[in-house]
Amino acid sequence: MSIFNIEFEEFKFLVESCIPPSHISRSVFFDDVINKYFYQMTEDERTELYKYIIRNDVCGDDESCEIFRMRFDPQNQYDVYTLYNNEKKVHRAFKRNDNYYTEKNKYIDEEFITKIVKV
């Protein structure tokens, strides 16, 4: 499959056009913004996208919108340190319902958390 590079300003417009509720392919892309593209952006780009999407409440009450706000909110970012099978890792996570998530439907089991640092 081909990979396309787009300017960040165009990416913001694309994300906005895919805000749920929308067609399934747009919803899948919106979930990819939360699960995948978040990690490809700089901190400044994440903050800019967050401010752009939450302006004027263009992102509604849909669960995906709620998760987007939590994922990109600069005040809800944590480095979560884990130890699992003698392997130490640091995960960038967001807090939701007293759990620390790395993706929309993927959270870190508290039994493996060794330290949490607010970013």
Image (cartoon, rainbow, N blue to C red):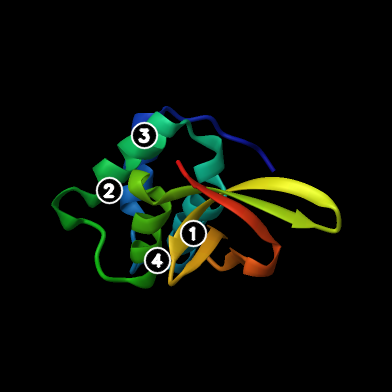
Contact (CB < 8 A) between labels 1 and 3?
no
**Mark toward the start of the polypeptide (1 vs 3):** 3
What's the residue at 43%, 54% (across, down)? 71
For the N terminus, the quadrant is top right
| Amino acid at dot 4 | Ser
The residue closer to the viewer here, 47 or 17, is 47
Label 2 amino acid?
A: Ile
Q: Quadrant of residue 46?
A: top left
The answer to whether mark 1 and mark 2 are in CB contact below 8 A is no
- Label 1 to label 3: alpha-carbon separation: 18 Å
Mark 3, other Cα within 10 Å: few <14 / some 14–19 / many ≥20 = few
Residue 10 screen position, x and y as percent = 36, 34
Quadrant where the C terminus is found in the figure:
top left
CB contact under 8 Å: marks 1 and 4: yes
Q: Quadrant of residue 22?
A: bottom left
The residue to which callout 4 is attached is 64
How would you rate the neighbour count of disc 1 (Cα within 10 Å): few for under 14, some for 14-19, many for 20 or more? many
Residue shown at the point (55%, 36%) measured from the top left: 40
In primary-sequence order, the first of circles 1 and 4 is 1
